[in-house]
Image (cartoon, rainbow, N blue to C red):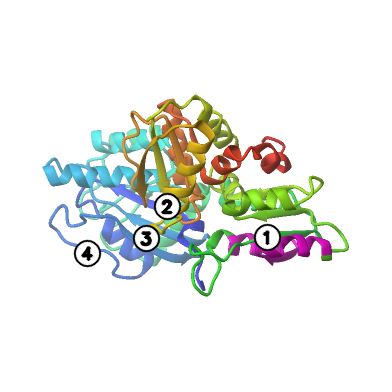
Amino acid sequence: MNKTPKSLRLHIGIFGKTNVGKSSFLNAITKQDVSIVSDIAGTTTDIVEKSIELFPIGPVTFLDTAGINDNTELGELRKEKTLSILQRTDIAILIIDFEGLTNYEEELINYFKEFNIPYLVIINKYDIEQITSDKYNEIIEYNNNIIETSTTIDSEICSKVIEGLVKILPEEFITPKSILGDKISSGDTILLVTPIDKEAPKGRLILPEVQTIRDILDNDCISIVVQENRLKEAIENLKIKPKLVVTDSQAFKAVNEIVPETIPITSFSILFARLKGDLKSFIDGSKSIDNLQPNDKVLILESCTHHAIDDDIARVKIPKLLKQKLGFDLNFDYKTGHDFPSISGYKLIIHCGACMTNRKEVLSRILISKKKNIPITNYGIVISYCLGILDRAIKIFNCE
């Protein structure tokens, strides 16, 4: 873990028609041969990702996409993949040529607006054929953040591109969100409950635990890490009660019973629901649980791919808790990674803590779900709701 995880990097998507120069641009801006460059249209067939440190922005991940104007059967699949990248794009770079804005670029711009993605326009290959003033003015009507480049992208042009990106940086990358910074004060003691079970990675802690510890330290607070079997002992040994107890969702029931009511509790999953998504939307989504009917379809989204174990939280524990709460079975489907399927027909979507994906992707999924009127929530909120302790678990956030 010597590098910033992709989930915390600014995601910059590169979009445009086939053979417009997207891959050449990526190679130039990263100063590496990341993407294959060819005069043959459609050379880029899948998403190419490259993570670098981009001064003065910081850690970023570039996403080089396939052109969206390939009308073949394979081209349609490429287009679907390209459009899916929009869901995790924080900033877009739209590369065009002398043809200006065609239906394809206008379609992309509409998607940028739908997903609230700021974008920079690059008019490429002006040394081959320059764009007319009329077409240039058409672009300005959409966006005046425009840079012209040639087939040979030098360091001066790269500097202009970076300056253009800085102008449209989302606020959360200028002033990054803190996991707990607005809820704790210098010198506070935070107790973290981290069970070491089958799901715990060998020799290390899971990412939400690591990032929470770092956030506590960044805010000049004291972090104490225990397993649930030592929690009571740890609280009793403290001269001053902890400001907060944060637990892995799987130990929620035991932690709720051990920790006095005077001490707030929450979970890593709820912290990340707030950090990576929209806590209020997830809380509202949990309220639909009581409206579910036998055999309703529920979609569970997991950011990372892993082998399911005997007591897997998504495939065993959450379905079991929901059955105990409702008294009947539901039908569960699972999707892992960045693929977000058609959600029509589902009565509830349950998202993981999203430690392995960026906030933009989670917010995009919330947006799509709301447009379809399908409630969405996350692991920690579902677990605390089923255990009857959701109100306590979110009390510190004042129902924001």
Can residue 145 be seen here? The reply is yes
Q: Which mark is residue 208?
A: none
Can residue 377 be seen here? The reply is no
Which element carries disc 3, helix, strand or loop?
loop
Quarter of the rendering occupied by the C terminus = top right
Q: Amino acid at mark 1?
A: Leu
Q: Which residue is mark 4?
A: 36
- For marks 3 and 2, give the CA distance: 13 Å
Within 10 Å of disc 2 (Cα), the crowding (few <14, some 14-19, many 20+) is some
Q: Main secondary structure of the magenta part?
A: helix
Residue 158: % across, % down: 40, 61
Q: Residue at x 45, y 34 (%)?
A: 367
**Contact, mark 2 vs mark 4 (Cβ under 8 Å):** no
- State which mark lies toward you, 4 or 3: 3
Magenta residue check for 270: no
Height in image: 176 above or below 395?
below
Count of marks, rendered view: 4
Q: Which is more N-terminal, label 1 or label 4?
A: 4
Q: Which residue is mark 3?
A: 307
- For marks 4 and 1, give the CA distance: 46 Å
State left or right for residue 245 relative to residue 262: left
- State which mark lies toward you, 2 or 1: 1
Q: Amino acid at mark 4?
A: Ile
Q: Which residue is mark 2?
A: 303
Residue 82: % across, % down: 29, 46
**What range of the chain is rendered magenta?**
209-236
Magenta residue check for 233: yes
Q: Which mark is residue 192?
A: 1
Within 10 Å of disc 3 (Cα), the crowding (few <14, some 14-19, many 20+) is few
Residue 29: % across, % down: 37, 63
- State which mark lies toward you, 3 or 2: 3
